[in-house]
Image (spheres, grey):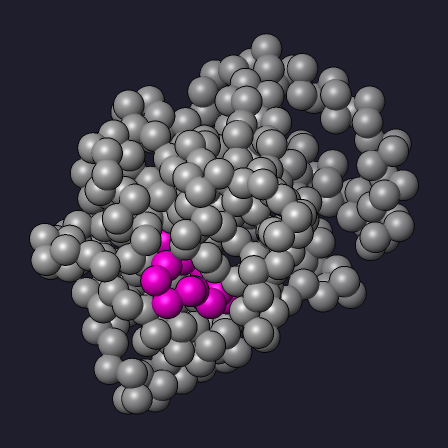
Amino acid sequence: MLNNRLLNKKTGIVIVVTNEKHNLKMFFESLAEQSYKNFSLYFIDNNSSDSSVEFSKELNKSFCFDIKYTLLNENAGDAKGNSLGASRAVKDGCDYVFILNNDTELEPTCIEELIKLIEKDEKTGVTGPIFFYWTKEKIANKIQIYGAFVDFNTQKTNLIGATQMYEETELPEILKCDYPIGGALLIKREVIEKLGYLFDDRFFMYNNEIDFSRRVQALGYHSLATTKAKVWHNHKWVRDNKAGWYREYYLSERNKFLYYHKYKMYYHMLRMLIIDVIKYPWRLKWFIKVCNFKLGIWYLRGMTSGLLNIKGKPKISIIK
C-alpha cells in the first residue's frame, strides 16, 4: 500500500496508438483495475485510420479517465510518439512518466509496485515489470522478458528469463539491469528533464532501449525490474505478415549502425559490418525459412541505410 506522499504523486501514462483500436477495451479495463489511481493518460495517435481515437472516446464514457490526446498527421513512430507524450506529461507536472504498450494487461498492483520501487533509492531512475506472454487467465507462466543487460560497444543484449517458465526459474525479486523491457517503463520526472528528450527519434522504432539506457546511466541513474509488478503482453504476431517482417528487420539492422554514428564509434561500426556480412549467408537461409528471400533484401537495405546514416522515418513502402 502506498503512503499518502506517494499517493499524491501523479503519473502520466503514455501510449502510442497506430491503428490499434482492437487493443483498447482490454487496455482500458486493465487500467481501471489498478490500485493506484492518480494518473492521466496521454494518448498519442499516429494518424490511425481505424477510428482508434473515436473508439477510445466512446469507451471512456464508461471509464472516465483523464485522457489528453495528441493527434499526429502521420505515423511518426514509437520513439517520437513516446517522447511527445513524455514531454507533455512533464510539462503538466507529472512526477512519473509510464511508457506503456497498448497491447498489455497489468496486474492490479503493477503501477503501485513500480512506484514503491522507484522511490526506495534516489538514484533509481527507471523501473519496470516482468513481462509474460499473454494468457486469458493471466497466469504467470512463460516469461517474455524480465530485464536486459547490454554491451554498449557491441550492442549484444542478454535478455533475462526470456521464454523460460516462471515457476521453473529462480529470479531475484528485484533485478538491477541495464534496462527493463521498453513496453512498460516507469521513469522519474527528473530523469526526463535531465535527458532533455526521452527516445531519439532518429531510430523511429526498434533499438530505442539501448540508446535510452546508455543516456540514463551517463546521468548516474540505474534501472530496476521487479517480479512484484507483472504485465501480460498480448502481441499478435501473424507469421504471414510479410510487411511486418520487412519493417522489423530493416529498422533493427539500420538502427544498429545509426547508434554507432550517433556516438562516433566507427571501429565498432566496421567490426559489426564485417560480422554481419560474414554471417549473412546463414541468416539468409533463416530469412527464407521464416518468411521469404525478400526479407534478406530488406535486411541489406537496412544495413545500407544505417551505414549512410539515414535517420528517422524511412521513405519506403513498408512504413505507412
Q: Percent position (x, y) of residue 98?
A: 32, 54
Q: Which residues are magenta?
A: 99-110
Horizontal side, residue 161 vs residue 45: left or right? right
Does residue 65 sit above or below 269 in this rendering?
below
Does residue 246 sit above or below 173 in this rendering?
below
Q: Residue at x 32, y 50 (%)?
A: 114
- The front one of 276 and 183 is 183
Does residue 132 sit above or below 29 in this rendering?
above
Does residue 315 sit above or below 241 in this rendering?
above
Q: Percent position (x, y) of residue 38?
A: 19, 65
Horizontal side, residue 133 vs residue 4: left or right? right
Q: Percent position (x, y) of residue 78?
A: 45, 53
Report the label total. Answer: 0
Magenta stretch encompasses residue 215: no
Q: Residue at x 54, y 18 (%)?
A: 153
Q: Quadrant of the N terminus?
A: bottom left
Q: Is residue 138 visible?
A: yes
Q: Residue at x 62, y 52 (%)?
A: 167
In which quadrant of the rendered view does residue 59 lie?
Answer: bottom left
Horizontal side, residue 214 vs residue 251: left or right? left
Quick one: which residue is furthest to the top in this view?
267
